[in-house]
Amino acid sequence: MITIYKKNAFPEEKEFIRINDIYFNKYTVEMLDNKAADIIWKIDQSKMKDKYSIESRFDGSKLNIDKLSTGCKTTLNILYNPDKIFDISECGENALEIIYKLPQGYVYCDYPMIAFNLERAEAVDKSGTHIFEDYEELKEWWENED
């Protein structure tokens, strides 16, 4: 289940990553394995050729894996680095749908970024931890100031 943090509710021991592209290109790319191929296909409709390249969905040409969308990179960051908090503000609905189905991970955004197919999410603010199974309830929590 994904855990969502609000401002000033980050645990001190967790590292917060705001710029997903750089983090992916520097660290996460080294961790990629077969699990990444399915996510790359679902979000960017590209085939993973090897750890460092993908096949373009437009013309089939071989591209460096750093050409993935920021949403795809963010999803992979969360999957492969479940101990860190990632900003999801640059993710589209296609990435959010997968992020909210991941078995674990930590996310943050200044404003509500919720997949329409939300099944369950844990949210943390200054008052504690809350479990949401409804899109509208989570959106209301996210919009309320603490």
Image: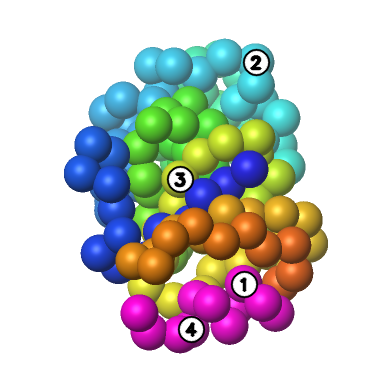
Question: Going from the N terminus, do you reach mark 2 or mark 1 first?
Answer: 2
Q: How far separated are the C-alphas under marks 2 and 4? A: 37 Å
Numbered circle sitting on residue 138: 1
Amino acid of disc 2: Asn
Q: Is residue 74 visible?
A: no
Q: Are marks 2 and 4 in contact (CB under 8 Å)?
A: no
Which region shows up in magenta? 136-146
Q: Which is more toward the observer, 145 or 66?
A: 145
Question: Going from the N terminus, do you reach mark 2 or mark 3 first?
Answer: 2
Q: Which residue is mark 2?
A: 34
Does residue 138 belong to the magenta stretch? yes
Q: How far separated are the C-alphas under marks 4 and 3? A: 18 Å
Question: Going from the N terminus, do you reach mark 4 or mark 3 first?
Answer: 3
Question: Going from the N terminus, do you reach mark 2 or mark 4 first?
Answer: 2
Query: Residue 70, percent across and down?
Result: 45, 51
Question: Going from the N terminus, do you reach mark 1 or mark 3 first?
Answer: 3
Q: Is residue 31 above or below residue 108?
A: above
Q: Which residue is mark 4?
A: 143
Query: Residue 124, percent across and down?
Result: 44, 59
Crowding at dot 2, Cα within 10 Å, few <14 / some 14-19 / many 20+, comes out as few
- Please, what is the dominant secondary structure of the magenta stretch? helix
Q: Which residue is mark 3?
A: 106
Query: Residue 75, percent across and down?
Result: 53, 42
Q: How far separated are the C-alphas under marks 2 and 1? A: 32 Å
Q: Which is more toward the observer, 65 or 3?
A: 3
Q: How far separated are the C-alphas under marks 1 and 3? A: 15 Å
Residue under the image location 39 percent in, 67 percent down:
127
Q: How far separated are the C-alphas under marks 2 and 3? A: 22 Å
